[in-house]
Image (tube, helix red, strand yellow):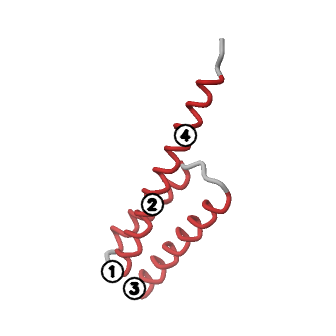
């Protein structure tokens, strides 16, 4: 039984899935930043949680993962600053 073609197809599917997850993650991070800027903290927190989940699901290479993680960290910090200033 030859599993090489199946393995290649699965690898292509995984790569496509990771690209799509990356697009969704970027959009969610942008949305979260917009919501924080608009003082919609509950919705911004949901965006943060969604982005965090998407990042955990995606199997990304080092530089791209690091960049998205830094962006996620920036969103978390913005949420913290906004929450502290609202208190």
Could you tell me residue 58's position as x and y percent?
A: 55, 49
State the SS at label 3: loop
Residue identifier under label 1: 39
Q: Name the residue nearer the viewer: 2 or 68.
A: 2
Q: What's the distance in space between the residues labelled 4 and 2, CA to CA?
A: 23 Å
Element assignment for label 2: helix
Q: In this rendering, is residue 64 above or below 60?
A: below
Q: Residue at x 33, y 80 (%)?
A: 39
Q: Quadrant of residue 42?
A: bottom left
- Residue sitting farthest toward the right: 62
Residue 41 coordinates in the image, percent (x, y): 35, 74
The answer to which of marks 2 and 3 sits earlier in the sequence is 2
In the image, residue 51 sits, relative to residue 77, either above or below, namely above
* Distance between the alpha carbons at the discs numbered 1 and 4: 37 Å
Residue at the spot of label 2: 49
Q: State which tag comes first along the sequence, 1 or 2.
A: 1
Which of pointers 3 and 1 indicates the residue nearer the eye?
Answer: 1
As drawn, the label of residue 14 is 4
Along the line of sight, which residue is nearer the eye, 29 or 84? 29
Q: Of the residues under marks 3 and 1, which one precedes in the sequence?
A: 1
Instruction: Identify which residue is drawn at 61% across, 61% down.
Output: 64
Seen at 49% across and 56% down, the residue is 22
Q: Nearer the viewer, mark 3 or mark 4?
A: 4
Q: Quadrant of residue 8?
A: top right
User: Where residue 87 is drawn, which disc sits there?
Assistant: 3
Q: Is residue 86 left or right of residue 51?
A: left
Q: Name the residue rendered at 63%, 64% in the picture.
A: 66
Q: What crowding class fits label 1: few (fewer than 14 Cα within 10 Å), some (14-19), or many (20 or more)?
A: some
Mark 4 and mark 2 residues within 8 Å of each other at the beta carbon: no
Give the Cα separation between the discs numbered 1 and 2.
17 Å
Do the numbered discs 2 and 3 sit on residues whose CB atoms are within 8 Å? Answer: no
């Amino acid at each position: 039984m030859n599993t090489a073609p199946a393995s290649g197809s699965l690898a292509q599917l995984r790569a496509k899935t990771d690209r799509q997850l990356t697009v969704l993650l970027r959009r969610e991070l942008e949305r979260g930043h917009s919501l924080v800027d608009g003082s919609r903290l509950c919705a911004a927190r949901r965006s943060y949680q969604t982005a965090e989940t998407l990042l955990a699901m995606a199997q990304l290479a080092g530089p791209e993962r690091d960049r998205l993680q830094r962006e996620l960290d920036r969103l978390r910090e913005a949420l913290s600053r906004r929450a502290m200033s609202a208190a």
